[in-house]
Each structure stands twice: as C-alpha cells, then as structure tokens.
Amino acid sequence: MRLWTIFAVVLAPALAAGGAPPAHKRAVVSQNQMLNFKGGLLYKSGLQTSCEVALISISAAFVAANCFNFTSDGKLDASIEYAVYIDQRNLGKDILKSPLATADITVHPSYDPATLANNIAMVQFNRGMVAPYVSYISTNPPPDTTQAYARRSVDDAGQRWNLPLVASQPEDSSDCTDSAIYLKNRDSMACTGNITPSIYTESCGIPYGTMYQVTDDQIVLAGIYSHSVLLGNSTCSNTGGWHNYYTLLAPYVGFAANVLKIQLDVYSNLTPIKSTTTSIVSMNNTDQTAPSKGTVVGGDFYRLQGADDPAETSSESGPGPEPDADSSSESKTKSKSTDDSEGFTKTQTIVVAVVVPVGVILISVGAFIVYRIWLAKRQDHAWDPHRNAAELQDAAMELDIGGGPDVERMPPEYDTIVHSAPAPAARITPQKPMSPEKD
C-alpha cells in the first residue's frame, strides 16, 4: 500500500504528462535591458507630455494620433509647436539633449477621433540622430511570446531622463471587452491593466507608453499606447480598475513605408527582414466607443490630470469633493473676520453715500464759476490778427523802430499748411530659426 501511494503521488502525474512540451517560462524584462532601447517623448509647446513615440529609425517614429491637437475642421493645429526628445541612455547619456523639431506629421487617413480606430500617426524629425539606429517591429510573433511595457519620463527640474519603468504581463483578453474598437480588432490591438504613478501626482495613474514582444532572448518593438477604459470615474484615486489598449504596429508597416518612402525593418517569427509591404490597411470601425459602464480617456495624461496648470481639471473627472465640516467652519470664520477688519459698517456706508454726492456737486459748481470768469477775460483779449497787427504797426511808428508787421500781410490759412508725410517704417527681416545643438 505504501508503494502504491508513492506511485500515485509522484510517478502518476509525470506519466500522465506524456510527451507534452514543457510550459513556456514567461520572459521578464529588466530595467537594465530596457535601457538598451532608444525611446522618446512628444513635447507640445515646450511641455513634456505622457505621449511616447515608438522610434523606428534615426528620423521617424510612430505616435498616437490623439496626442495631437486638431482644429474644428479636422486639421492639425498649427499654433502648437511639436518636438521630440530622444532617450539616449543606451549611450550612457541621461542629460536631456536638444529637441528634434518635427519636420512632418502624417495622421493615418482612416483615423477616427470618436472611436479611436487607426489611432496612429507618423512623425518625422528635421534632423536625424548622429548614430545610426534601427528598431525592429514585431510583425509575426510566435505564440509563446509575452508582452513588456515601458514608461519613459523626464525630470523637468534636473533636465535628465528618469530610469524607464518596466512591467511584464501576458495579455488577458477576457478582461478587455470594455472597448468596442478592441472587440472588433483583436488582431490589431493589445490590452493590459498595467499602470504606473504619474511623475507629477503620485495619486494619479498613467498607462505605460510603449509595448514590446518578448521571447527568451529577443525584445522587439510591438505597439504604442492608444487609449484606456476606466471602470471608475477618474484617473486619480480610481478604484474601479483600468483597461489600457495598445495599437499594434505590424498592420501599419505599409502606412509607414508609404509615408517615409523606405522599407522598414521587421522581425517576423524571430527572423529580421526588410518588409516589402506598402499596403495601407485600416481597422474595422465601430459606432460606439465603449459600453456605458466605462469612460474612455487617452492622449496626454499630464494635461488631462492638470499638471503644470492647476486651474485645468481632468476632463473625465467628476465634481470635486465637498469640504468637510472643519474646513467649512474655518472658511466661514475667515470670511467673517475679513468682513470685521476690512469692511464698512452700516453707519460708515450711509455717511459715505451722503457726503460724496454733496461734495461732487459743490466741486462742480465751483469749477463752473471759475470757468465762466476765465472765459470772460479770454473774450476781452481774444486773438484778432488784423487788430493786433495794426496795434503793433502804430507802436512801431510812434517809437520810430522797424520790425512792425505789415497790416497787408495776412496770417497763414491753417488749411494751406502742408504736413510732411511720415518716414516709411523700417523693414524687419525675420531671422531664421536656430538649428538645435548637435549631439
């Protein structure tokens, strides 16, 4: 009996497994491994955004289309200055280098801002990085790959790159059914519940910016953050949970190839190749953004959560909390104290209301009397060019001196005086923008 028990507990499970392959060990990406990959951030009018760029070459990157500002007619807002900063920690440099100004931004032709279908764009820089760089795009990952997510950010005060934050988690599509666009495009999107604290407000969550496909020995760029569905009502102190959705880059290799006029480097089934596709594909669109139980958010979370602009509130947040009793009492006490120390009493208010109008009337009457006296004197000595000229002529003759005016010479008519034209304004030649400092 004892031998049979040992067989049942130890040997039976092993025999039952038979020739089944061992389960794949989930790959985990470390922070040091992520430092080997270049990444970047989109800046808008000099401000850091939470929008990461998926760098694919020395002069171009993918970025989510809802990170840009659009006018009412659907065009890019030209008043916004866009720039890209590149993380070069793989070269041992954490200091923020000069930005790469955007030379061109191309939004996917089928981007739908309402449903967030095809939420992707290509941004090209006005100059490339000094060192050549190629980032492979995962196009046909094997079934045993997992996902890694990175969040890059900059220390604004120190002007240095923070260490990237990394999370590894396999996709669980059963928990991602809140986004209608995801349900119709499972092969073109990925989903995760991973979030990280915001660099500006730790109580506020923020999704990871870029997605990578990971095998035992390979890490390949795979997707970029698109949008989230909140099961609560705020990105700060949210207790309902997050579902974050990523646009996979593989379907948009043809779109990028058409924009850049190059063949992209891709990683197909663990093999690096040059892609020859130029087909521009689009997602299956939908009429709704999400079920009513969720709130769709996306774009720049820093501005959404009010960073750098305390007066701005999050567009998805509900009304602020009501003040508690203590704070309310303190506010009322302060208001009453202010009224007692700085306000007018009723008696003072009545005195001011009576005295001020009477004073104004007396001053007005006095000013009128002074004006009439001045006007009467002025009329006695009003300027008459003929009379004054005659008086001066008589005086000159009595004193037998020259210089008296000739009565026949009439004073000039004012409407005959010619005013010289003003000098033309100096032309100002606009200066060309300074080229950013090279690395």
Image (spheres, rainbow, N blue to C red):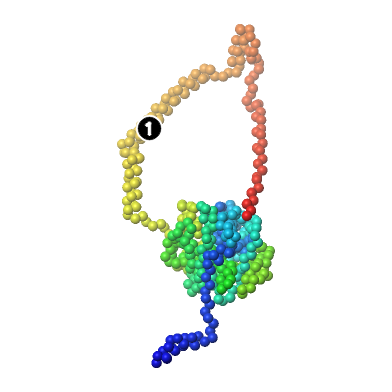
Q: Which type of secondary structure does the marked residue at label 1 adopt?
A: helix
Amino acid on which disc 1 is placed: Val
Q: Is residue 410 left or right of residue 158?
A: right
* Residue visible at 56% across and 59% down in the picture: 41
Residue drawn at (64%, 58%), measured in percent from left and top? 129
Quarter containing the C terminus: bottom right
Residue sitting at x 64%, y 13% = 403
Residue linked to disc 1: 356
Query: Whole-percent x and y of residue 206?
Result: 49, 62
Residue 399 placement (x, y as % from top left): 61, 7
State the image coordinates of residue 55 (x, y, percent, origin top left). Answer: 60, 63
Residue 33 occupies quadrant = bottom right
Quarter in which the N terminus is drawn? bottom left
Q: Nearer the viewer, residue 368 or 359?
A: 359
Residue 45 % position (x, y): 56, 52
Q: Report crowding for label 1: few under 14, some 14 to 19, many 20 or more residues within 10 A (C-alpha).
A: few
**Residue 117 appears in the figure:** no
Q: Is residue 232 above or below residue 155?
A: below
For residue 343, side relative to residue 407 (left or right) = left
Q: Which residue of the protein is positioned furthest toward the bottom in this rendering? A: 1
State the residue in front, 116 or 38: 38
Reply above or below: 389 against 103.
Answer: above
**Looking at the image, is 277 positioned above or below residue 19?**
above
- Which residue appears farthest toward the left when viewing the image? 347
Judge by depth and name the residue closer to the eye, 126 or 64: 126
Quarter-wise, where is residue 251 in the image?
Answer: bottom right
Q: Is residue 412 visible?
A: yes
